[in-house]
Amino acid sequence: MKVFDRISVLHLMAGALQAMLAYGLYQSAELHVWPATHAAAYIPLFMVMVFLPLSFYCASEAMAVRRWLLSIGVALAAALVGLHQGLTTGSLRRHAETAAGWSPSQVGDYLGPALIFFVAAFLLVPALALISRDRWRVDYARWVDALLRNALILGQAALVLALFWGVLASAAGLFKLVALTFLADLIEQAWFSIPLSTLVFAHAVSVVVRINRVADFIYLRARQLCGWLYPLAALLGIGFVGSWGVQGIERLLSTGRAASLLLWFVVLSLLLLNLASRGGAEPVAGGRAMRTLTALGKLVLLPMVAVAGYSLSLRISQYGLTPERVWAMVVTLIVGLLVVGYVLDALGALRDRYPGWLMPATNVVAAVVTVLAILLLLGGPLDPRRLSVNSQMARLDVSGGDDQALVNFLAWQGGSYGVAALTSLAREASESDSGAARRSAMALQMLGRMRENRSRLHEQVASLPVFPRTSTVPSALLERLGDEPLLAGCSAQVADNNACLIWALQLEVTGQSAFVVLGREFTEQPPFGRIWFEDEQGDWKIGGTLGPAQTLDGCEASDYRPAGLFDAVVQNRVEFAAKNIRDLVFDRFRIPTTIWSADGCR
Protein backbone atom coordinates (compact mmCIF):
# COMPACT_ATOMS: atom_id res chain seq x y z
CA MET A 1 0.00 0.00 0.00
CA LYS A 2 1.30 3.41 -0.89
CA VAL A 3 2.14 5.79 1.95
CA PHE A 4 0.64 8.72 0.05
CA ASP A 5 -2.08 8.22 -2.53
CA ARG A 6 -4.99 10.31 -3.77
CA ILE A 7 -6.94 9.86 -0.53
CA SER A 8 -3.96 10.94 1.54
CA VAL A 9 -3.35 14.01 -0.60
CA LEU A 10 -6.99 15.12 -0.24
CA HIS A 11 -6.89 14.68 3.52
CA LEU A 12 -3.56 16.47 3.80
CA MET A 13 -5.03 19.37 1.83
CA ALA A 14 -7.83 19.62 4.38
CA GLY A 15 -5.31 19.37 7.19
CA ALA A 16 -3.14 22.09 5.61
CA LEU A 17 -6.10 24.47 5.41
CA GLN A 18 -6.85 23.77 9.04
CA ALA A 19 -3.20 24.31 9.96
CA MET A 20 -3.09 27.75 8.34
CA LEU A 21 -6.28 28.88 10.06
CA ALA A 22 -5.31 27.41 13.43
CA TYR A 23 -1.85 28.99 13.44
CA GLY A 24 -3.23 32.32 12.24
CA LEU A 25 -5.80 32.37 15.04
CA TYR A 26 -3.14 31.41 17.58
CA GLN A 27 -0.83 34.19 16.42
CA SER A 28 -3.60 36.77 16.49
CA ALA A 29 -4.42 35.76 20.07
CA GLU A 30 -0.74 35.78 21.02
CA LEU A 31 -0.15 39.27 19.60
CA HIS A 32 -3.60 40.56 20.59
CA VAL A 33 -4.44 41.76 17.07
CA TRP A 34 -7.43 41.23 14.79
CA PRO A 35 -9.33 38.91 14.74
CA ALA A 36 -8.54 38.04 18.37
CA THR A 37 -9.73 41.46 19.47
CA HIS A 38 -13.24 40.93 18.06
CA ALA A 39 -15.42 37.98 19.01
CA ALA A 40 -17.53 38.47 15.89
CA ALA A 41 -14.43 37.81 13.76
CA TYR A 42 -12.56 35.26 15.86
CA ILE A 43 -15.42 32.87 16.62
CA PRO A 44 -16.60 32.45 12.98
CA LEU A 45 -13.02 31.80 11.85
CA PHE A 46 -12.60 29.29 14.67
CA MET A 47 -15.77 27.49 13.56
CA VAL A 48 -14.52 27.38 9.96
CA MET A 49 -11.14 26.08 11.14
CA VAL A 50 -12.85 23.22 12.98
CA PHE A 51 -15.67 22.22 10.65
CA LEU A 52 -14.17 22.60 7.19
CA PRO A 53 -11.78 19.64 7.62
CA LEU A 54 -14.09 17.78 10.00
CA SER A 55 -16.91 17.79 7.45
CA PHE A 56 -14.48 16.61 4.78
CA TYR A 57 -13.39 13.71 6.98
CA CYS A 58 -17.00 12.69 7.77
CA ALA A 59 -18.10 12.81 4.11
CA SER A 60 -15.85 9.96 3.00
CA GLU A 61 -18.76 8.26 1.20
CA ALA A 62 -19.00 11.07 -1.36
CA MET A 63 -16.81 11.88 -4.36
CA ALA A 64 -14.04 14.45 -4.03
CA VAL A 65 -15.88 17.41 -5.59
CA ARG A 66 -19.01 16.74 -3.60
CA ARG A 67 -16.96 16.37 -0.40
CA TRP A 68 -15.35 19.76 -0.89
CA LEU A 69 -18.65 21.48 -1.71
CA LEU A 70 -20.33 19.83 1.25
CA SER A 71 -17.47 20.79 3.56
CA ILE A 72 -17.53 24.40 2.41
CA GLY A 73 -21.30 24.56 2.88
CA VAL A 74 -21.13 23.18 6.44
CA ALA A 75 -18.22 25.51 7.22
CA LEU A 76 -20.25 28.52 6.04
CA ALA A 77 -23.19 27.44 8.21
CA ALA A 78 -20.81 27.08 11.15
CA ALA A 79 -19.40 30.55 10.42
CA LEU A 80 -22.90 32.06 10.50
CA VAL A 81 -23.51 30.36 13.84
CA GLY A 82 -20.17 31.67 15.07
CA LEU A 83 -21.02 35.17 13.87
CA HIS A 84 -24.21 35.19 15.92
CA GLN A 85 -22.37 33.85 18.95
CA GLY A 86 -19.66 36.49 18.55
CA LEU A 87 -22.17 39.31 18.29
CA THR A 88 -24.00 38.24 21.46
CA THR A 89 -21.16 37.45 23.89
CA GLY A 90 -21.26 40.83 25.59
CA SER A 91 -21.86 39.80 29.21
CA LEU A 92 -20.40 41.88 32.00
CA ARG A 93 -18.19 38.97 33.03
CA ARG A 94 -16.31 39.29 29.75
CA HIS A 95 -15.84 43.01 30.31
CA ALA A 96 -14.85 42.61 33.93
CA GLU A 97 -12.28 39.92 33.22
CA THR A 98 -10.71 41.32 30.07
CA ALA A 99 -11.34 45.08 30.32
CA ALA A 100 -11.28 45.27 26.52
CA GLY A 101 -14.61 43.45 26.28
CA TRP A 102 -13.56 40.08 24.86
CA SER A 103 -10.53 37.84 24.61
CA PRO A 104 -9.86 34.38 23.10
CA SER A 105 -9.11 33.26 26.65
CA GLN A 106 -12.90 33.04 27.06
CA VAL A 107 -12.91 29.58 25.48
CA GLY A 108 -16.49 28.87 26.56
CA ASP A 109 -17.75 31.46 24.08
CA TYR A 110 -16.68 29.35 21.10
CA LEU A 111 -15.83 25.88 22.41
CA GLY A 112 -19.34 25.26 23.76
CA PRO A 113 -21.13 26.23 20.51
CA ALA A 114 -18.56 24.22 18.52
CA LEU A 115 -19.23 21.06 20.55
CA ILE A 116 -23.00 21.45 20.15
CA PHE A 117 -22.74 22.21 16.43
CA PHE A 118 -20.56 19.10 16.08
CA VAL A 119 -23.60 16.97 16.92
CA ALA A 120 -25.57 18.54 14.06
CA ALA A 121 -22.67 18.22 11.61
CA PHE A 122 -21.98 14.64 12.66
CA LEU A 123 -25.58 13.64 11.92
CA LEU A 124 -26.06 15.73 8.79
CA VAL A 125 -22.83 15.34 6.81
CA PRO A 126 -23.01 11.54 6.22
CA ALA A 127 -26.64 11.85 5.12
CA LEU A 128 -25.81 14.55 2.57
CA ALA A 129 -22.83 12.53 1.38
CA LEU A 130 -25.02 9.46 0.78
CA ILE A 131 -27.88 11.17 -1.09
CA SER A 132 -28.64 9.27 -4.28
CA ARG A 133 -28.63 11.45 -7.40
CA ASP A 134 -31.44 9.62 -9.12
CA ARG A 135 -33.94 9.25 -6.25
CA TRP A 136 -32.65 11.87 -3.78
CA ARG A 137 -32.89 9.36 -0.97
CA VAL A 138 -30.51 8.13 1.69
CA ASP A 139 -30.13 4.46 2.46
CA TYR A 140 -30.87 4.25 6.18
CA ALA A 141 -28.59 1.28 6.95
CA ARG A 142 -25.66 2.92 5.16
CA TRP A 143 -26.27 6.15 7.09
CA VAL A 144 -26.19 4.33 10.43
CA ASP A 145 -23.02 2.50 9.38
CA ALA A 146 -21.46 5.78 8.30
CA LEU A 147 -22.21 7.37 11.69
CA LEU A 148 -20.47 4.62 13.61
CA ARG A 149 -17.63 4.40 11.10
CA ASN A 150 -17.01 8.16 11.35
CA ALA A 151 -16.94 7.92 15.14
CA LEU A 152 -14.39 5.11 14.87
CA ILE A 153 -12.33 7.03 12.29
CA LEU A 154 -12.14 10.20 14.38
CA GLY A 155 -11.44 8.21 17.55
CA GLN A 156 -8.61 6.22 15.96
CA ALA A 157 -7.10 9.36 14.42
CA ALA A 158 -7.17 11.06 17.82
CA LEU A 159 -5.45 8.03 19.32
CA VAL A 160 -2.75 8.14 16.62
CA LEU A 161 -2.19 11.84 17.30
CA ALA A 162 -1.87 11.21 21.03
CA LEU A 163 0.63 8.39 20.44
CA PHE A 164 2.58 10.57 17.99
CA TRP A 165 3.03 13.34 20.54
CA GLY A 166 3.80 10.76 23.19
CA VAL A 167 6.68 9.50 21.06
CA LEU A 168 7.97 13.03 20.41
CA ALA A 169 7.72 14.00 24.09
CA SER A 170 9.52 10.82 25.15
CA ALA A 171 12.27 11.39 22.59
CA ALA A 172 12.65 15.01 23.72
CA GLY A 173 13.09 13.80 27.30
CA LEU A 174 15.76 11.33 26.20
CA PHE A 175 17.71 13.98 24.30
CA LYS A 176 17.52 16.27 27.32
CA LEU A 177 19.35 13.62 29.34
CA VAL A 178 22.41 14.20 27.16
CA ALA A 179 22.03 18.01 27.16
CA LEU A 180 20.44 18.16 23.70
CA THR A 181 17.34 20.34 23.93
CA PHE A 182 16.69 21.01 20.25
CA LEU A 183 13.68 18.65 20.04
CA ALA A 184 12.08 19.98 23.23
CA ASP A 185 12.60 23.55 22.02
CA LEU A 186 11.09 22.65 18.64
CA ILE A 187 8.00 21.09 20.22
CA GLU A 188 7.39 24.29 22.19
CA GLN A 189 7.27 26.37 18.99
CA ALA A 190 3.70 27.03 17.86
CA TRP A 191 4.71 27.25 14.19
CA PHE A 192 5.86 23.64 14.49
CA SER A 193 3.40 21.97 16.87
CA ILE A 194 0.09 23.39 15.56
CA PRO A 195 0.52 22.60 11.82
CA LEU A 196 2.12 19.27 12.61
CA SER A 197 -0.83 18.23 14.80
CA THR A 198 -3.40 18.98 12.10
CA LEU A 199 -1.37 17.25 9.39
CA VAL A 200 -0.75 14.13 11.50
CA PHE A 201 -4.46 13.93 12.34
CA ALA A 202 -5.39 14.36 8.67
CA HIS A 203 -2.98 11.64 7.57
CA ALA A 204 -4.22 9.33 10.35
CA VAL A 205 -7.79 9.78 9.08
CA SER A 206 -6.70 8.89 5.54
CA VAL A 207 -4.93 5.74 6.77
CA VAL A 208 -7.98 4.62 8.75
CA VAL A 209 -10.28 5.28 5.79
CA ARG A 210 -8.13 3.18 3.49
CA ILE A 211 -7.87 0.26 5.92
CA ASN A 212 -11.59 -0.49 6.11
CA ARG A 213 -11.05 -3.90 7.63
CA VAL A 214 -9.97 -2.44 10.96
CA ALA A 215 -13.03 -0.19 11.21
CA ASP A 216 -15.33 -3.03 10.15
CA PHE A 217 -13.78 -5.36 12.73
CA ILE A 218 -14.24 -2.81 15.53
CA TYR A 219 -17.77 -2.12 14.30
CA LEU A 220 -18.76 -5.79 14.54
CA ARG A 221 -17.17 -6.20 17.97
CA ALA A 222 -18.91 -3.04 19.20
CA ARG A 223 -22.27 -4.41 18.05
CA GLN A 224 -21.60 -7.69 19.84
CA LEU A 225 -20.59 -5.97 23.06
CA CYS A 226 -23.58 -3.64 23.00
CA GLY A 227 -25.86 -6.60 22.29
CA TRP A 228 -24.59 -8.06 25.56
CA LEU A 229 -24.73 -4.80 27.55
CA TYR A 230 -28.20 -3.66 26.52
CA PRO A 231 -30.06 -6.55 28.23
CA LEU A 232 -28.22 -5.61 31.44
CA ALA A 233 -29.31 -1.98 31.05
CA ALA A 234 -32.88 -3.14 30.34
CA LEU A 235 -32.97 -5.29 33.50
CA LEU A 236 -31.64 -2.42 35.63
CA GLY A 237 -34.17 -0.02 34.14
CA ILE A 238 -37.04 -2.41 34.77
CA GLY A 239 -35.90 -2.88 38.37
CA PHE A 240 -35.49 0.85 38.96
CA VAL A 241 -38.91 1.78 37.59
CA GLY A 242 -40.42 -1.11 39.53
CA SER A 243 -39.02 0.33 42.75
CA TRP A 244 -41.22 3.40 42.28
CA GLY A 245 -44.24 1.26 43.09
CA VAL A 246 -42.79 0.62 46.53
CA GLN A 247 -41.34 3.98 47.58
CA GLY A 248 -42.75 6.46 45.05
CA ILE A 249 -40.80 9.17 43.29
CA GLU A 250 -40.78 11.87 45.98
CA ARG A 251 -37.29 10.96 47.18
CA LEU A 252 -36.04 10.94 43.58
CA LEU A 253 -37.46 14.41 42.89
CA SER A 254 -36.09 15.83 46.15
CA THR A 255 -32.49 15.19 45.04
CA GLY A 256 -32.58 18.06 42.51
CA ARG A 257 -30.68 15.87 40.03
CA ALA A 258 -33.44 13.56 38.88
CA ALA A 259 -33.77 14.99 35.38
CA SER A 260 -30.07 14.82 34.52
CA LEU A 261 -29.51 11.31 35.92
CA LEU A 262 -32.63 9.85 34.30
CA LEU A 263 -31.81 11.40 30.93
CA TRP A 264 -28.25 10.09 31.08
CA PHE A 265 -29.50 6.55 31.70
CA VAL A 266 -32.11 6.79 28.94
CA VAL A 267 -29.63 8.18 26.40
CA LEU A 268 -27.11 5.45 27.25
CA SER A 269 -29.77 2.77 26.89
CA LEU A 270 -30.86 4.16 23.52
CA LEU A 271 -27.25 4.25 22.34
CA LEU A 272 -26.65 0.62 23.34
CA LEU A 273 -29.90 -0.47 21.70
CA ASN A 274 -29.09 1.29 18.43
CA LEU A 275 -25.58 -0.12 18.29
CA ALA A 276 -26.83 -3.61 19.01
CA SER A 277 -29.59 -3.45 16.38
CA ARG A 278 -27.87 -1.31 13.72
CA GLY A 279 -30.27 1.51 14.42
CA GLY A 280 -33.27 -0.80 14.26
CA ALA A 281 -32.44 -2.05 10.79
CA GLU A 282 -31.77 -5.53 12.22
CA PRO A 283 -33.41 -7.25 15.22
CA VAL A 284 -31.41 -7.76 18.40
CA ALA A 285 -29.81 -11.20 18.37
CA GLY A 286 -31.45 -13.81 20.60
CA GLY A 287 -34.60 -15.84 21.02
CA ARG A 288 -38.09 -14.90 22.13
CA ALA A 289 -36.99 -14.21 25.72
CA MET A 290 -34.39 -11.70 24.49
CA ARG A 291 -36.92 -10.00 22.22
CA THR A 292 -39.34 -9.71 25.13
CA LEU A 293 -36.65 -8.25 27.39
CA THR A 294 -35.71 -5.77 24.66
CA ALA A 295 -39.32 -4.67 24.30
CA LEU A 296 -39.78 -4.28 28.07
CA GLY A 297 -36.53 -2.30 28.23
CA LYS A 298 -37.99 0.13 25.69
CA LEU A 299 -41.27 0.44 27.59
CA VAL A 300 -39.67 1.42 30.93
CA LEU A 301 -37.86 4.30 29.25
CA LEU A 302 -41.16 6.15 28.84
CA PRO A 303 -41.84 6.69 32.57
CA MET A 304 -38.21 7.67 33.05
CA VAL A 305 -38.47 10.42 30.44
CA ALA A 306 -41.83 11.49 31.85
CA VAL A 307 -40.40 11.88 35.36
CA ALA A 308 -37.34 13.69 33.98
CA GLY A 309 -39.58 16.12 32.12
CA TYR A 310 -41.73 16.63 35.21
CA SER A 311 -38.66 17.30 37.37
CA LEU A 312 -37.36 19.80 34.84
CA SER A 313 -40.73 21.54 34.65
CA LEU A 314 -40.71 21.97 38.44
CA ARG A 315 -37.32 23.66 38.32
CA ILE A 316 -38.42 25.97 35.51
CA SER A 317 -41.65 26.93 37.27
CA GLN A 318 -39.73 27.70 40.46
CA TYR A 319 -36.69 29.48 39.09
CA GLY A 320 -37.43 30.32 35.45
CA LEU A 321 -35.39 29.51 32.37
CA THR A 322 -31.62 29.54 32.10
CA PRO A 323 -29.54 28.61 29.03
CA GLU A 324 -28.76 25.25 30.61
CA ARG A 325 -32.45 24.55 31.23
CA VAL A 326 -33.33 25.53 27.67
CA TRP A 327 -30.84 22.97 26.35
CA ALA A 328 -32.18 20.44 28.88
CA MET A 329 -35.69 21.03 27.50
CA VAL A 330 -34.46 20.39 23.96
CA VAL A 331 -32.69 17.18 25.01
CA THR A 332 -35.77 16.02 26.90
CA LEU A 333 -38.04 16.65 23.90
CA ILE A 334 -35.74 14.83 21.47
CA VAL A 335 -35.21 11.89 23.82
CA GLY A 336 -38.96 11.81 24.48
CA LEU A 337 -39.61 11.67 20.73
CA LEU A 338 -37.24 8.71 20.41
CA VAL A 339 -38.74 6.90 23.38
CA VAL A 340 -42.32 7.29 22.12
CA GLY A 341 -41.34 5.80 18.77
CA TYR A 342 -39.47 2.95 20.47
CA VAL A 343 -42.42 2.24 22.78
CA LEU A 344 -44.73 1.90 19.78
CA ASP A 345 -42.17 -0.42 18.22
CA ALA A 346 -41.99 -2.43 21.46
CA LEU A 347 -45.78 -2.79 21.62
CA GLY A 348 -45.72 -4.20 18.10
CA ALA A 349 -42.94 -6.60 19.09
CA LEU A 350 -44.90 -7.90 22.08
CA ARG A 351 -47.76 -8.70 19.71
CA ASP A 352 -45.34 -10.61 17.45
CA ARG A 353 -45.34 -7.90 14.84
CA TYR A 354 -41.99 -6.72 13.48
CA PRO A 355 -42.67 -4.04 10.92
CA GLY A 356 -38.95 -3.17 10.83
CA TRP A 357 -39.57 0.47 9.95
CA LEU A 358 -40.92 2.23 13.07
CA MET A 359 -37.61 2.44 14.96
CA PRO A 360 -35.61 3.58 11.89
CA ALA A 361 -38.28 6.16 11.04
CA THR A 362 -38.14 7.46 14.61
CA ASN A 363 -34.38 7.81 14.39
CA VAL A 364 -34.61 9.76 11.14
CA VAL A 365 -37.25 12.13 12.50
CA ALA A 366 -35.27 12.65 15.70
CA ALA A 367 -32.09 13.37 13.72
CA VAL A 368 -33.88 15.98 11.60
CA VAL A 369 -35.38 17.60 14.70
CA THR A 370 -31.97 17.62 16.40
CA VAL A 371 -30.26 19.35 13.50
CA LEU A 372 -33.01 21.95 13.15
CA ALA A 373 -33.11 22.60 16.90
CA ILE A 374 -29.35 23.13 17.09
CA LEU A 375 -29.38 25.50 14.13
CA LEU A 376 -32.28 27.49 15.57
CA LEU A 377 -30.83 27.71 19.07
CA LEU A 378 -27.25 28.45 18.05
CA GLY A 379 -28.17 30.58 15.06
CA GLY A 380 -30.29 33.11 16.91
CA PRO A 381 -34.04 32.61 16.30
CA LEU A 382 -34.37 30.63 19.55
CA ASP A 383 -31.22 31.78 21.32
CA PRO A 384 -31.25 30.18 24.83
CA ARG A 385 -29.84 33.35 26.39
CA ARG A 386 -32.60 35.51 24.92
CA LEU A 387 -35.31 33.05 25.98
CA SER A 388 -33.80 32.88 29.47
CA VAL A 389 -33.55 36.65 29.84
CA ASN A 390 -37.18 37.05 28.73
CA SER A 391 -38.24 34.37 31.21
CA GLN A 392 -36.36 35.95 34.11
CA MET A 393 -37.63 39.43 33.29
CA ALA A 394 -41.20 38.09 33.19
CA ARG A 395 -40.70 36.88 36.76
CA LEU A 396 -40.03 40.37 38.14
CA ASP A 397 -43.48 40.58 39.74
CA VAL A 398 -43.31 37.10 41.26
CA SER A 399 -43.51 37.41 45.02
CA GLY A 400 -40.38 36.38 46.87
CA GLY A 401 -38.14 36.81 43.86
CA ASP A 402 -34.45 37.32 44.53
CA ASP A 403 -33.53 40.62 42.87
CA GLN A 404 -29.80 40.12 43.39
CA ALA A 405 -29.96 36.67 41.77
CA LEU A 406 -31.78 38.22 38.81
CA VAL A 407 -29.18 40.96 38.41
CA ASN A 408 -26.34 38.44 38.69
CA PHE A 409 -27.94 36.20 36.06
CA LEU A 410 -28.42 39.07 33.62
CA ALA A 411 -24.84 40.21 34.11
CA TRP A 412 -23.02 36.88 33.96
CA GLN A 413 -25.15 34.49 31.90
CA GLY A 414 -27.42 36.58 29.71
CA GLY A 415 -24.88 37.64 27.09
CA SER A 416 -25.68 40.85 25.25
CA TYR A 417 -29.39 40.25 25.94
CA GLY A 418 -28.67 40.31 29.66
CA VAL A 419 -26.65 43.52 29.40
CA ALA A 420 -29.51 45.17 27.49
CA ALA A 421 -32.03 44.03 30.12
CA LEU A 422 -29.73 45.23 32.90
CA THR A 423 -29.48 48.63 31.26
CA SER A 424 -33.27 48.74 30.98
CA LEU A 425 -33.60 47.93 34.69
CA ALA A 426 -31.15 50.69 35.58
CA ARG A 427 -33.33 53.25 33.78
CA GLU A 428 -36.62 52.18 35.32
CA ALA A 429 -36.23 53.65 38.80
CA SER A 430 -39.57 54.54 40.35
CA GLU A 431 -40.16 56.39 43.61
CA SER A 432 -43.57 54.78 44.02
CA ASP A 433 -42.26 51.27 43.58
CA SER A 434 -39.61 50.42 46.13
CA GLY A 435 -38.90 47.08 44.41
CA ALA A 436 -38.18 48.75 41.07
CA ALA A 437 -35.98 51.34 42.80
CA ARG A 438 -34.03 48.59 44.53
CA ARG A 439 -33.52 46.65 41.30
CA SER A 440 -32.47 49.85 39.53
CA ALA A 441 -29.84 50.52 42.17
CA MET A 442 -28.51 46.96 41.90
CA ALA A 443 -28.37 47.20 38.11
CA LEU A 444 -26.54 50.53 38.27
CA GLN A 445 -24.07 49.08 40.74
CA MET A 446 -23.46 46.06 38.52
CA LEU A 447 -22.99 48.20 35.40
CA GLY A 448 -20.68 50.49 37.33
CA ARG A 449 -18.34 47.63 38.21
CA MET A 450 -17.19 47.38 34.61
CA ARG A 451 -16.46 51.10 34.35
CA GLU A 452 -14.84 51.09 37.80
CA ASN A 453 -12.57 48.15 37.00
CA ARG A 454 -11.63 49.64 33.65
CA SER A 455 -10.91 53.07 35.19
CA ARG A 456 -8.83 51.50 37.95
CA LEU A 457 -6.76 49.55 35.42
CA HIS A 458 -6.09 52.67 33.34
CA GLU A 459 -4.97 54.55 36.44
CA GLN A 460 -2.68 51.68 37.39
CA VAL A 461 -1.09 51.59 33.94
CA ALA A 462 -0.58 55.38 33.99
CA SER A 463 1.28 55.05 37.32
CA LEU A 464 3.88 52.56 36.02
CA PRO A 465 7.45 53.95 35.95
CA VAL A 466 8.94 54.87 32.58
CA PHE A 467 12.60 54.32 31.65
CA PRO A 468 14.65 56.23 30.72
CA ARG A 469 13.27 58.71 33.23
CA THR A 470 13.29 61.50 30.66
CA SER A 471 10.90 59.63 28.37
CA THR A 472 7.18 60.20 28.11
CA VAL A 473 4.60 57.62 27.12
CA PRO A 474 1.95 58.93 24.67
CA SER A 475 -1.52 59.06 26.14
CA ALA A 476 -2.88 56.98 23.25
CA LEU A 477 -0.51 54.15 24.17
CA LEU A 478 -1.48 54.36 27.84
CA GLU A 479 -5.11 54.11 26.78
CA ARG A 480 -4.31 51.06 24.69
CA LEU A 481 -2.32 49.40 27.48
CA GLY A 482 -5.25 50.02 29.80
CA ASP A 483 -7.07 47.29 27.90
CA GLU A 484 -4.52 44.64 28.91
CA PRO A 485 -5.93 42.66 31.88
CA LEU A 486 -2.57 41.15 32.90
CA LEU A 487 -1.30 44.60 33.85
CA ALA A 488 -3.81 44.60 36.72
CA GLY A 489 -1.31 42.54 38.73
CA CYS A 490 1.52 45.05 38.27
CA SER A 491 3.13 47.16 40.98
CA ALA A 492 4.63 50.60 40.34
CA GLN A 493 7.40 49.99 42.89
CA VAL A 494 10.43 48.67 41.00
CA ALA A 495 11.68 46.78 44.07
CA ASP A 496 8.56 44.62 44.31
CA ASN A 497 8.50 41.12 42.86
CA ASN A 498 5.43 41.97 40.79
CA ALA A 499 6.88 45.26 39.56
CA CYS A 500 6.32 46.41 35.96
CA LEU A 501 7.73 49.24 33.88
CA ILE A 502 7.40 50.81 30.45
CA TRP A 503 10.64 51.01 28.50
CA ALA A 504 11.09 53.59 25.73
CA LEU A 505 13.69 52.71 23.10
CA GLN A 506 14.64 53.24 19.49
CA LEU A 507 15.19 50.08 17.49
CA GLU A 508 15.11 51.44 13.93
CA VAL A 509 17.46 53.80 12.13
CA THR A 510 14.48 55.98 11.27
CA GLY A 511 14.39 57.13 14.88
CA GLN A 512 10.84 55.95 15.45
CA SER A 513 10.13 55.43 19.12
CA ALA A 514 8.98 52.08 20.43
CA PHE A 515 7.80 50.98 23.85
CA VAL A 516 8.04 47.69 25.70
CA VAL A 517 6.27 46.59 28.88
CA LEU A 518 8.53 44.57 31.18
CA GLY A 519 7.77 42.71 34.38
CA ARG A 520 10.24 41.55 36.99
CA GLU A 521 8.73 38.10 37.48
CA PHE A 522 6.16 37.96 34.68
CA THR A 523 6.51 35.50 31.83
CA GLU A 524 6.65 36.43 28.17
CA GLN A 525 2.87 36.31 27.88
CA PRO A 526 1.52 39.36 26.02
CA PRO A 527 1.75 42.26 26.52
CA PHE A 528 5.07 41.64 28.33
CA GLY A 529 8.06 41.63 26.01
CA ARG A 530 6.03 42.91 23.05
CA ILE A 531 7.22 45.94 21.09
CA TRP A 532 4.59 48.63 20.51
CA PHE A 533 4.82 50.87 17.41
CA GLU A 534 2.60 53.68 16.21
CA ASP A 535 1.15 53.15 12.74
CA GLU A 536 0.33 55.76 10.13
CA GLN A 537 -3.17 56.25 11.55
CA GLY A 538 -1.80 57.02 15.00
CA ASP A 539 -2.89 53.70 16.52
CA TRP A 540 -0.53 51.75 18.75
CA LYS A 541 -0.13 48.09 17.86
CA ILE A 542 2.24 45.25 18.65
CA GLY A 543 4.89 45.16 15.94
CA GLY A 544 7.52 42.81 17.33
CA THR A 545 8.81 40.92 20.33
CA LEU A 546 11.94 40.61 22.42
CA GLY A 547 13.69 37.28 22.58
CA PRO A 548 14.53 34.56 22.76
CA ALA A 549 17.61 35.39 24.83
CA GLN A 550 21.08 34.29 23.72
CA THR A 551 24.55 34.47 25.20
CA LEU A 552 27.17 36.69 23.55
CA ASP A 553 28.51 33.74 21.55
CA GLY A 554 25.08 33.21 19.95
CA CYS A 555 24.09 30.19 22.01
CA GLU A 556 20.72 29.79 23.67
CA ALA A 557 20.57 31.19 27.21
CA SER A 558 18.60 28.61 29.19
CA ASP A 559 19.19 30.44 32.48
CA TYR A 560 17.64 33.73 31.30
CA ARG A 561 14.99 35.25 33.57
CA PRO A 562 12.79 38.33 32.91
CA ALA A 563 14.13 39.90 36.13
CA GLY A 564 17.57 40.20 34.53
CA LEU A 565 16.45 42.54 31.75
CA PHE A 566 14.11 44.37 34.13
CA ASP A 567 16.94 45.23 36.55
CA ALA A 568 19.28 46.15 33.67
CA VAL A 569 16.74 48.66 32.33
CA VAL A 570 16.24 50.19 35.79
CA GLN A 571 20.01 50.49 36.27
CA ASN A 572 20.63 51.75 32.72
CA ARG A 573 22.95 48.84 31.88
CA VAL A 574 21.40 47.92 28.51
CA GLU A 575 23.49 48.47 25.38
CA PHE A 576 22.37 48.30 21.77
CA ALA A 577 24.43 46.23 19.36
CA ALA A 578 24.12 46.17 15.58
CA LYS A 579 23.49 42.77 14.03
CA ASN A 580 26.58 41.40 12.32
CA ILE A 581 24.74 39.10 9.91
CA ARG A 582 24.32 40.65 6.49
CA ASP A 583 21.12 40.43 4.48
CA LEU A 584 20.98 39.70 0.75
CA VAL A 585 19.82 42.45 -1.62
CA PHE A 586 19.30 42.20 -5.37
CA ASP A 587 17.05 44.12 -7.75
CA ARG A 588 14.09 45.17 -5.57
CA PHE A 589 14.34 42.26 -3.14
CA ARG A 590 15.83 41.89 0.33
CA ILE A 591 16.35 38.42 1.82
CA PRO A 592 17.13 38.31 5.56
CA THR A 593 19.57 35.65 6.72
CA THR A 594 19.44 33.74 9.97
CA ILE A 595 22.10 31.50 11.51
CA TRP A 596 20.53 28.72 13.55
CA SER A 597 23.65 27.73 15.49
CA ALA A 598 27.04 29.22 16.34
CA ASP A 599 30.45 27.71 16.98
CA GLY A 600 30.95 26.68 20.57
CA CYS A 601 27.31 25.79 21.33
CA ARG A 602 26.99 22.41 22.95
Image (tube, rainbow, N blue to C red):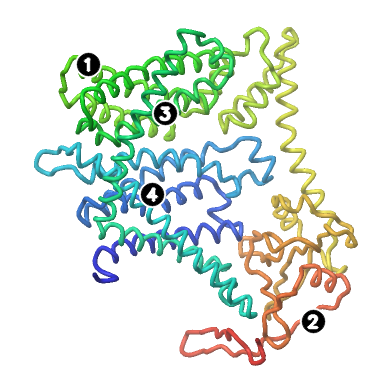
- Determine whether the residue tagged by mark 2 lies in a helix, strand or loop: loop
Residue 116 locus on image (x, y percent)? 43, 38
Would you place residue 496 above or below residue 247 in this image? below
Task: Look at label 3 and name its amino acid.
Answer: Pro
Left or right of 88, for residue 215: left
| Tag 1–tag 4 contact (CB < 8 Å) | no
Q: In the rendered picture of this protein, how many numbered marks are placed on residues?
A: 4
Reading the image, the residue beneath label 2 is 575
Label 2 environment density (alpha carbons within 10 Å; few <14, some 14–19, many ≥20): few
Would you place residue 356 above or below residue 489 in this image? above
Query: Mark 2 and mark 4: span between their CA atoms?
Result: 49 Å
When asked about the image quadrant of residue 242, the answer is top left
Which residue is at a point 53% across and 53% down the rendered structure image? 35
Left or right of 380, for residue 88: right
Reading the image, the residue beneath label 1 is 350
Task: Look at label 1 and name its amino acid.
Answer: Leu
Would you place residue 272 above or below residue 548 in this image? above
Q: Which badge, 1 or 2, comes first in the chain's sequence?
A: 1
Query: Mark 1 and mark 2: span between their CA atoms?
Result: 89 Å
Task: Look at label 4 and name its amino acid.
Answer: Phe
Reading the image, the residue beneath label 4 is 51
Query: Mark 3 and mark 2: span between their CA atoms?
Result: 60 Å
Residue 597 locus on image (x, y percent)? 60, 86
Q: Which badge, 2 or 4, comes first in the chain's sequence?
A: 4
Q: Which mark, residue 381?
A: 3
Which residue is at a point 26% across and 63% down the rendered structure image? 7
- Determine whether the residue tagged by mark 3 lies in a helix, strand or loop: loop
